[in-house]
Amino acid sequence: MILQHRSHNDIDVVQLSGRFAMADCGEINLSIQDLINQGHGKLLIDMEKVTFIDSSGCAVLVAAYKSLQLKAGRLVLVTSPSVQSLIELTRLHTIFEIFPNQDAALEAM
Amino acid sequence: MDVIIFADRKGQELLPLTDQTCVPLLPLAGKLIIEHTLEDLVDAGFRQAHIILSPFAEQVKQALGNGKRWGMTLSYSTSRGEGSALAELRRLKQQPKTPFLVMRGDVVRSRSLKDFLLQAETADIPVVPALFNGANAYLLVCRNVLEPLLHCLDWTVASPTFAASHAIDINGCVARLDSLAAFHQANLDAAAGRIAGLLIPGRQAAVGLTLGRNTTANPQNLTQGIALIGSNCHLHPTVALSGEVVIGDNVIIGSQASLESTVVLPHSYIGELVDLRNAIVRGNDLIRIDTLAILKISDTVLLDDLKNTGVLNKDLEATINRLAGVLLLLLSLPLWLLALVLALSQNRGKMYSVQILRGNKRLMDDLGVLQRTAFKAGEWQVKPPVLRYLPRILAVISGDLRLVGSLPVSLAAAEKRRDQWEKLADQAPAGLLGPTQLNLPIAASDEEKLLSDCVYAANYSGKANALCLLQSLQALMTRKAWVG
Amino acid sequence: MVTNFQIPPVMLTLQIDSSIPCISPLGEAIHSLCLYATDSTECASQMQLAVIEAINNIVLHAYHNRKGNPITVKWNNENRQLRIEITDFGDSMTAPPIPELAPWDAENGRGWWIINACVDEYDYKVVFCDPQNAGPETGKPVTSPEKANILTLIKHY
């Protein structure tokens, strides 16, 4: 699992790739929560290159969404097919704002 | 032309109907709401569509599949629900090619798509919304993805603002299904043909009565009005339907229930004597449209009772049986004398005893449920079965027993029959003679006897009964009949 | 002409330690095996997801995140049916939980919902086994309690 972070104007962009499973979740969660605490309340998590995600990965996304809600911020996701299918399976697509690619997401934000 | 269907309503306004499913999957006049839109598209010559879903997306995908059933190719994506159409369209992985058709699939409109498309072709404006008799039809042809006028597709926009001159107003109607009352009314309207062009499944069994396959209902069930009944339903002959009634698939309605202007969702169960008016029934839930109160209907009718009525209550057969009982009594008079003599000689104290058994007569109990009643069956205290059970001929004359039937049991033993297979035996009337009485030794276990009665009930027929009578004549000559 | 070469019935046994870094490689192995057998990426992904969710549960709840305990995965392919048996020797569940979807804001409790959706059938049992069998061949520690929890996941393809 690789996590890259960059800022685009006032938007924090986190790009994940590889497997997003329990082994990586602790660290990713810490980094994302840090970013949320320091950032401007706009977070884009780009998972277009994530090959696998499990329920602990989902939990990280839910935690990020809840933290941003407290800050009245906004979480936007970009998904790969496997991420999208787990999100739909757990019906989280009714909660998360999802875009097909990073450009569309940045433009919408 | 590409087709995008929005079916992303969250369905709050239709709770509790949408607590386990979503709006496009609710039934409207025998079909899913979204099916009406798909059929309209196929009728207008479209062969593919992309559907945007929100809650219970997986259920919709499962229900519609790849669209082969309609000769279509369907693709899907999901959204958070009830978002702005403009934003949702831009979020699609594959952008539609202009011009394209956008519509909502979680409302129902009369079949006017072809008319609309014909007129839209000539209109030279970037977005052509459809009005059906002045009402927003949630249907438009779009020549530019970035057109803000797309907001007339948004569910949350109460009344979209656009110049009437920029819309095409055609003859038709739209059911927004934006409240329980509207959903109820739309079902009645569809059944009565007030939403023109909808394909309604079923066959016309009588004037105003449309039945799905495998449904048992009588023309006299409909006292007045129109009824649309789905497939695999059982309506007791005494059920009364009036006004406009829409009944979904797999619905069972008990005797003397009366339904007026009511919508019954699939897999529901309506007990005996229930009186419904202006209501929606979903499973055990009853929603009254006038008060929006939600009540539970108690299911007092058992499934097997509904099936039973055919076997137990044939009046002519009952009379013939009783006459046969009289004849048998006359023929058996010499045996009674023999039984009396034997009983006197073998027993000093008790020569005649009485048992309480469950018979075939049925009476309504305190809860309004028909129950089989008990009767007193006499027995001579002698060994030969033929003589011992002679007094049961009296029960045949009184109508408590049939000549041929299952082994009569005590009320306590009948109570113990709880499993579905055990209850099967109750479907046959109890009788003086029968395969169980003739073929099994008296000492056989209760389970064995019950199993034999189940087989008898499952194969119940007049022919089998006649054969059984012949067999009993033969049995009269056997050792078993006289020794036990 | 199309000739369909059938894969003969195959049974493979994999074993990992109850530590979190072992789970991902096992998941990849299951994915590859299922893809090899079924030729369907969808089926392989679902099987991988179900196995990983099950093993996450074992590591966290049966072994309380303690390393050094064995988890055995038997992979079996026969009659167009994948059958995966996951055995552990940790704390048992009284019964497999009802697959209900947690409320959206819950941060855990989605595992069984996912397993239920990914496989056609599953079955959980606790068997009492002979402590004589303990040892390096069986992978069962000598000090282990005398029972094993077996979760079987079945998927038709």
Image (tube, coloured by chain):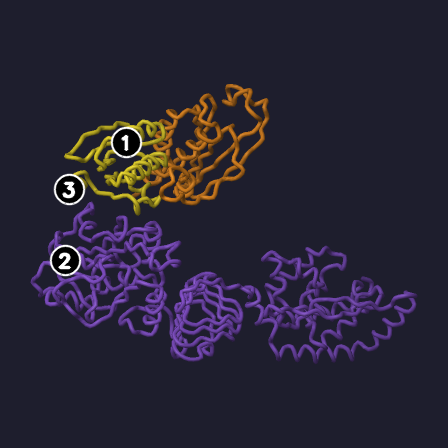
Q: Position of residue A37 (x, y in %)?
A: 26, 32
Is residue A79 visible in the rendered image? The answer is yes
Left or right, A68 with reference to B335: left
Q: Position of residue B396 (x, y in %)?
A: 72, 74
Is residue C73 visible in the rendered image? The answer is no
Quick one: label 1, few (<14), some, or many (20+) residues within 10 Å? many
Name, please, the residue furthest toward the left: B124
Q: Give residue A107's mark.
A: 3
Q: Earlier in the sequence, mark 3 or mark 1?
A: 1
Chain represented in purple: B
Query: Which element is circle 1 on?
Result: helix
Query: Which element is circle 2 on?
Result: helix
Q: On the image, numbered disc 2 is attached to which residue?
A: B149
Tag 3 near tag 1, CB within 8 Å? no
Left or right, A13 with reference to C38: left
Chain A pictured colour: yellow
Quick one: label 2, few (<14), some, or many (20+) residues within 10 Å? some
Q: Are marks 2 and 3 on the same chain?
A: no
Q: Nearer the viewer, mark 2 or mark 1?
A: 1
Q: Picture quarter containing residue C9?
A: top left
Q: Give residue A32's mark.
A: 1
Near-viewer residue (B282 or A64) = A64
Q: Identify the chain of the residue marked 2, using the numbered disc in the image.
A: B
Count the numbered circles shown: 3
Query: Which element is circle 3 on?
Result: helix
Chain represented in orange: C
**Marks 2 and 1, Cα distance to the nearest angstrom?**
38 Å
Type of amino acid under label 2: Leu
